[in-house]
Amino acid sequence: MKTPILLALALGTITLPISSNANDNLAQTRAQLKKWVETRQIISSEKADWITEEAILADTELLLKAELVRLNKTLEDVNASATAADEDRSELAAKKETLQAASAVVDGSIGALETELKSILPTLPEPLVEKIKPLIRRLPDDPNNTKMSLGERVQNIVGILSQADKFNTTITQTSESREIEDGKLVEVRTLYWGLGQAYYVDASGEYAGIGYPTEKGWEWPRIEGAGLEIKRLLDVYEGTEEIQFINVPARIK
């Protein structure tokens, strides 16, 4: 009976180590399987994240390309504007030089022009002088010592000459008091024929004559027997007489 018992104990002793190894292998396998599953999950998650990031990167690339195109276009426009600005700057610089040269010429001669203009003022008709008195008052007393700018002085001269030219190309009628013999004043109508000559006559036609400029001012000699013709001339101008040829005296210098 001892032999079966010993055999059974021996088999039991051999069986126990085999069961312990199997459990260890199973635990190891489970652990490896768990790690494999976790690795697959990580890979899947990383792949999903990469797909999302890839789409974002693709959109970002498109946006950056569009922005690059816009910036290049802006740079081209800026370069074009800079080129145009350089051309304008060069043109303005050339004009400035031209104006400065012209200003230098005018600045060197404007004093003489003002002095000459003052010298001819007595030869201008009184109605014109009255009209340009504000401009005459602005002529500097001393052209070499004035605070007026060059532009103001040029504008003043141009204004006087423009009004004189306008007066010279038109016929102007005025009512004036004319001094005759013994200091007597007579009310007359005067017809200025530009800057060179004028005719005057009183209401009765008795006192009449011509006027013309001299260096000391206008002279108004009386012409006997010319009153009716000069009166008719002024009446035609006013429209109270029909248009007709009229013989009137003239002075040719």
Image (cartoon, helix red, strand yellow):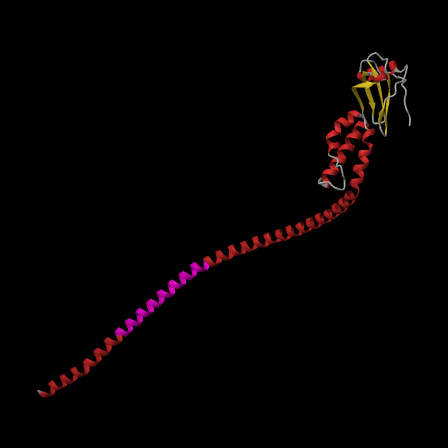
- From this view, report whether residue 162 is shown above or below residue 81: above
Residue furthest to the top in view is 204
The answer to which of 45 and 66 lies nearer the viewer is 66
Where residue 135 sits: x, y (%)? 74, 32
Judged left or right of residue 195, residue 79 is left
Seen at 54% across and 56% down, the residue is 65
109 part of magenta stretch: no
Indicate whether 33 appears above or below 206. below
Foreground pick, 142 / 190: 142
Q: With 84 as the anchor, is 57 left or right in this view?
A: left
What's drawn in magenta, residue-wise?
Answer: 26-55
Q: Is residue 78 visible?
A: yes
Q: Is residue 233 visible?
A: no
Q: Quadrant of the C terminus?
A: top right
Please give the name of the residue rendered at 74% of the width and 32% of the height, measured from the top-left corner: 137
* Whether residue 43 is situated above or below residue 211 in the rendered picture: below
Q: Furthest residue to the bottom?
A: 3
43 in magenta: yes
The image quadrant that residue 69 belongs to is: bottom right
Give the image location of residue 96, x and y in percent: 72, 47
Residue 42 placement: quadrant = bottom left
Q: Is residue 251 above or below residue 16?
A: above
For this orientation, the residue located farthest to the front is 182
The mark tally for this picture is 0
**Which quadrant would residue 217 be assigned to in this image?**
top right
- Our reading of the magenta stretch's main secondary structure is helix
Q: Residue at x 44, y 59 (%)?
A: 53
Instruction: Please state the horizontal and vertical placement of residue 108, each as a whole percent of the image.
Output: 79, 44
Q: Which image quadrant: the N terminus?
A: bottom left
Q: Position of residue 61 (x, y in %)?
A: 51, 57
